[in-house]
Image (spheres, grey):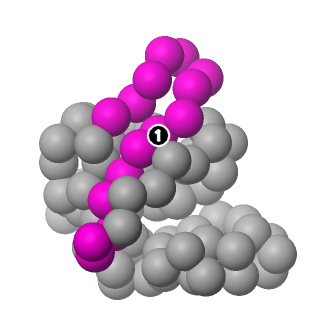
Amino acid sequence: MKRLSLIQLKENRKARVAEICAGSALHNRLMSMGIYKDRELTKLSHIGLKGPVVIKVGRTILALGHGMAGKIIVET
């Protein structure tokens, strides 16, 4: 399996969260949104160079900031 950050993942691709490289505050915030280790997600779009990353987790669609998305490592 290939590991890369959520930013590097191509649009309309599914991946599994391998790890979250962040502190406990951001880790807890992502968990409250349904993003945690071994959870499957789909990247829907990435707007611009530093714009938000839109993902689908379960039946929820979320827009994450560029910095937050860069701390999520996924496996394809």
Residue at image position (48%, 75%) is 35
Span highlighted in magenta in the image: 45-59
Question: In which quadrant of the rendered view does residue 31 lie?
Answer: bottom right
Locate residue 4 relative to residue 64 in the image: left or right. Answer: left
Q: Would you place residue 44 above or below residue 26 in this image?
A: above
Using the rendered image of the protein, determine whether residue 75 is visible from the camera's viewpoint: no
Residue at image position (47%, 79%) is 34
Q: Would you place residue 38 above or below residue 3 in this image?
A: below
Q: Is residue 53 magenta?
A: yes
Using the rendered image of the protein, determine whether residue 31 is visible from the camera's viewpoint: yes
Total labels: the figure holds: 1
Disc 1, SS? strand
Residue at image position (18%, 57%) is 14
Q: Nearer the viewer, residue 1 or 48?
A: 48
The quadrant of the picture occupied by the N terminus is bottom left
Counting from the top left corner in percent of width and height, residue 69 is at 55, 49
Residue farthest to the top? Answer: 48
Counting from the top left corner in percent of width and height, residue 23 is at 80, 72
Q: Nearer the viewer, residue 62 or 19?
A: 62
Counting from the top left corner in percent of width and height, residue 16 is at 29, 70
Question: In which quadrant of the rendered view does residue 46 lie?
Answer: top left
Locate residue 45 relative to residue 49 in the image: left or right. Answer: left
The type of residue carrying mark 1 is: Val
Q: Is residue 29 magenta?
A: no
The quadrant of the picture occupied by the C terminus is bottom left
- Find disc 1 in the rendering and name its residue: 53
Residue at image position (30%, 48%) is 43
Locate residue 28 relative to residue 25 in the image: left or right. Answer: left
Locate residue 11 relative to residue 27 in the image: left or right. Answer: left
At label 1, counting other C-alpha atoms closer than 10 Å, the crowd grade (few under 14, some 14-19, many 20 or more) is many
